[in-house]
Image (spheres, rainbow, N blue to C red):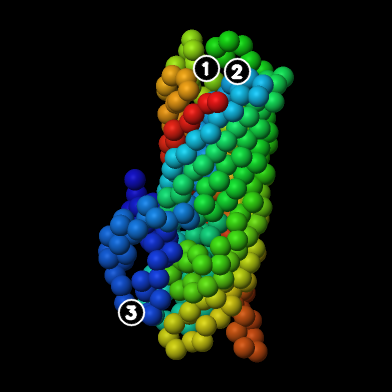
Amino acid sequence: MTRNSRSALTTTCFHHVSVNSGRVPVTRSARRWLGILTVLNSSCGGAAPMLHPAHTLPQSEMTMGAGTSGTFVMGDAASAIDAGEAAYDSQTLVGAEQEASYAEGLGAALSLAPGVAPWVGARVGLGLESEAGITYTGRSARVDARHALEQESFALSAGMGVTGVLLRPDARPFPGVLAGATQGWGLDVPVLAGWRSSGSVAQLWGGIRGGFEQLAGKVDVDLGAGSTTQSAELDLVRWQAGWVAGLGLGLDPVRVMLEVQLAHHWVAGSVAYAATGSASEHPVAIAGWSLAPAAAVVASF
C-alpha cells in the first residue's frame, strides 16, 4: 500500500475529532498516531459494501448483520488530499495556488471519503428469485432490489441501489473545516455471478459495479493566516466503475461475509469560497482509485 493511501485513511477520518481547531500546529505524524486511536469511533468512510452473494433469499426469509468497512484512496485522488492538507499545514491559505490545492483536496476527501465506517444491513426474499435490502454505513444509507437467474450451485444477479448521503452538521472531514454539512444522493448497478456449496456452507461471488453520486452543501472553513472564516459551497459529482469479490462461510443461521471492492473514480465540480464582497470559485477535476475491504457477521431468520 502506498504512503498516499495510508495517509488518506488516517488523516481524513481523524478530523472528526476537534484536536486542531485552535490552529495549534500538529505534525502529520502525530495526526496519524492519534487517528489510529480514534478511527474506530469515526464513521466517515465512504465504502458502501453489499456483503451478499449472487443467490437471492427464499421468499419471506430475512437476514440481518453488522460489521465494518474501510476505504483506502490511491492515485491522484490521494495526492490531492495530501496536497490539500499540506496547503492547510502551511498556515497561509491566502494565495490562489494554496486555495486551489486546498479546494481540490477538500473535494476529493468529501467525495471519496477515505476512512473506516460501520456497516449494518438487512435483506428479505421477495420470491421469484428476487430480494430487497437496506444498509447503513455512517456516511450514507442505501436501499436496493435485485433479480437473479439461479441454479442450485450457480447464479447470476443484477440490481439497482439508491443511496442517500446523510446530513451530518458535526462532521469535520478535512483540516480547517469548522462546521457545516453536505448531503446528496446516488445510484449504482451491481452485476454478480456466484457459486455456493451444498447447504451454502461456502459461497463465492464476484462481478462489476458502477454508479454515480451527487454531493452538495456548505461548510465553514478557516483559511488561516488571519483570514476570517469563510463559507465554502460545494457542488460535486462522482462517477465510479469497478470490481467486487466476496466470500461467505458458515452454517445456518450465522455466516461470516467478507468482501473487497476495487473501483476507479472520476470527480468533477467546484468549491467556491464566499468572502465578504467577493467570491472565489475553484474547479475540482480528480481521478483516482479506492480499495474497500469489508467484513460482517450475518444471521438468517
* Callout 3 secondary element: loop
Q: Name the kind of residue labelled 1 in the image.
A: Trp
Q: Considering the numbered disc 2 on the image, is that residue within a helix, a strand or a loop?
A: strand
Residue extending farthest to the right is 128
Q: From the top left corner, tell me how far across and down residue 107 is, in percent.
A: 54, 63
- Residues at marks 2 and 3, CA–CA distance in whole angstroms: 56 Å
Q: Nearer the viewer, residue 259 or 223?
A: 259
Identify which residue is drawn at 49% across, 87% down: 227
Q: Which one is nearer the viewer's eye here, 259 or 124?
A: 124
Of the 4 image quadrants, the one containing the C terminus is: top right
Question: Residue at point 49% right, 29% down?
Answer: 299
Residue 248: image quadrant is top left
Callout 3 amino acid: Val
2 and 1 marks in contact (CB < 8 Å): yes
Report the Cα–Cα distance between label 2 and label 1.
Answer: 7 Å
Residue under pointer 3:
24
* Disc sitting over residue 195 in the figure: 1
- Relative to 222, is 134 above or below? above
**So how many labels did they put on this image?**
3
Q: Answer few, some or many: residues within 10 Å of disc 3's Cα (few below 14, many 20 plus, some between 14 and 19).
A: few
- Identify the element where label 1 is drawn: strand
The location of residue 207, given as percent across then percent down, is 56, 29
Please give the residue where the numbered disc 2 appears in the rendered image. 155
Asked whether, in this view, residue 22 is left or right of residue 143, the answer is left
Type of residue at label 2? Ala
Q: Earlier in the sequence, mark 2 or mark 1?
A: 2
Residue 66 x, y percent position in the rendering: 47, 39
